[in-house]
Amino acid sequence: MDPVSPFPGRAEHAATASSVVELLEVLWGRGRDLATAPVSVSQLRLLYVLAENEGINLRTLTDTLASLPSSVSRLCDRLEAIGLVRRTASATSRRELQLHLTPAGRDFLAQLRSAREQALAEVLDAMPAADRRALMTGLTAFRRAASPQTGETSTARSA
């Protein structure tokens, strides 16, 4: 415990959370390694946004990703080139494009999520039931606290 901190145990809790995140990254990475199409973390984040926001336009996507339009456009170019994303003309504006996941993009995310969930299930299955319940309670509270900071408003899965 840090005796100078106005929040006793805060550094300790952050360090524990950080080590758990690192372990999750390892598990997550295993899932990505099993995926059929190699994508970067940025591309994967874009795919997750598209999965939750079918038909989003580039400007809204750029805002959601908190990135530069040119960077997001290049990400879309690469994902379109490997068949995971499709751009279509907007029905409401000739100057605007809508972005969609292709069936291959949806399949890719489904395979990735399945591999990741399997890796997590193996770890969770090794935990006693009471610890699993406590973890779920804590993760639910963490998600509620983090949602305003991440811009997440959906209760659906995320990256």
Image (cartoon, helix red, strand yellow):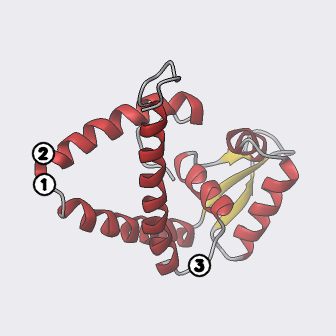
**In the image, residue 141 above or below residue 19:** above
Any mark on residue 130, and which?
A: 2
Give 135 or 111, whichever is nearer the viewer.
135
Number of other residues with Cα within 10 Å of mark 3, as a class: few under 14, some 14 to 19, many 20 or more = some
Q: Are marks 1 and 2 in contact (CB under 8 Å)?
A: yes
Kind of residue indicated by mark 3: Ala
How far apart marks 3 and 1 lie (CA) works out to: 35 Å
In this figure, which residue is indicated by the disc labeled 3? 37
Number of other residues with Cα within 10 Å of mark 1, as a class: few under 14, some 14 to 19, many 20 or more = few
Of the residues under marks 3 and 2, which one precedes in the sequence?
Answer: 3
**In the image, residue 9 above or below residue 23:** above
Give 136 or 49, whichever is nearer the viewer.
136
SS of the residue at dot 3? loop
Image coords of residue 140 (percent x, y): 34, 36
Image coords of residue 35 (percent x, y): 50, 77
SS of the residue at dot 2? helix
Residue drawn at x 20%, y 49% as measured from the top left:
132
- Residue located farthest toward the top when viewing the structure as drawn: 6
Kind of residue indicated by mark 1: Pro
Of the residues under marks 3 and 1, which one precedes in the sequence?
Answer: 3
In this figure, which residue is indicated by the disc labeled 1? 128
- Residue located farthest toward the left when viewing the structure as drawn: 129
Image coords of residue 8 (percent x, y): 42, 25
Q: Are marks 3 and 2 in contact (CB under 8 Å)?
A: no
